Image (cartoon, rainbow, N blue to C red):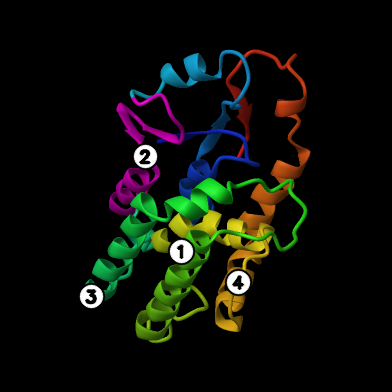
Amino acid sequence: MAYRLFTANRNYSSWSLRPWIAMKAAGIAFEEIVIPLYLPGSAEAIQKYSPAGKVPILIDGDDTIWESLAILEHLAERFPDAKLWPADRRARSYARAAATEMHGGFQPLRQHCTMNLWLPVKARPQPPEVLANVRRIETLWADCRARFGKNAERAGPFLFGAFGAADAMYAPVVARLHTYGLPVGPDTRAYMDAVMALPAWREWYDAAMKETWVMQHNEPDWPLVRGI
């Protein structure tokens, strides 16, 4: 059965990146349908598919799933072999807690460092509350990797060994820390580099660099379908 994932601009849509990169990294086939934001008719186009009027949206047969974390949970159930969550019970609970903290937290970072891949990478001064968010993220990532990543069934450089749902939830944070030149330690930087080295990350980034939707208003009717 074909899965359809509705996303928005690659440059801006942090929430779209989360399920997209998880599906790509896990090898889950899907059709991507892009509904650009910030153009006339964007909201109406999204509302045709999402009861919340937001992206991302996953269509799985007769099921419509919105919200990034809910989509990841749905995919984990549908594709258990992809192991989006760790196999170990304790690690899995910890991964879900970390993902949920991202889903509902770090508001100062989101407010002051919006995802914008077009920005030149350079250090930008930030208020104390943003730096406090960065410190919490660094502590959390270090704890995940020390407690579970190095000893995971599928050991690797990611939070719980292999790239999974928790990493997908924090992928836009990697973009923010990198773009805004936020101060991080070498272990955090190594994790960021591992995420940005993924082929899926490069594919998303390269597509973002080619977007022109916010610069012109004569696009054809939506949705715009990109073959996967």
* Residue beneath the point at 58% across and 66% down: 195
Q: Closer to the observer: label 1 or label 3? A: 1
In percent of width and height, residue 59 lies at 39, 31
- Residue 211 marker: none
Q: Count neighbours of disc 4 (C-alpha within 10 A) and say few if under 14, some if 14 to 19, many if 20 or more.
A: some
Q: Indicate yes or no whether the magenta region holds residue 67.
A: yes
- Residue on which disc 2 sits: 67
Residue farthest to the left? 89
Please name which of the two marks, 4 or 1, marks the residue nearer to the observer.
Answer: 1
Q: Residue at x 46, y 33 (%)?
A: 55
Estimate the spatial distance between the alpha carbons at disc 2 and disc 4, rounded to whole Å: 26 Å
Asked if the residue under mark 4 is in contact with the one under mark 3, i.e. CB atoms within 8 Å, the reply is no
Q: Amino acid at mark 2?
A: Glu
Q: Mark 1 sits on what residue? A: 133
Q: Which x, y percent locates residue 116? A: 65, 45
Q: Which residues are magenta?
A: 52-78
Q: Which residue, given by chain and number where applicable, does mark 3 sit on? A: 90
| Residue under pointer 4 | 194
Q: Nearer the viewer, residue 30 or 55?
A: 55
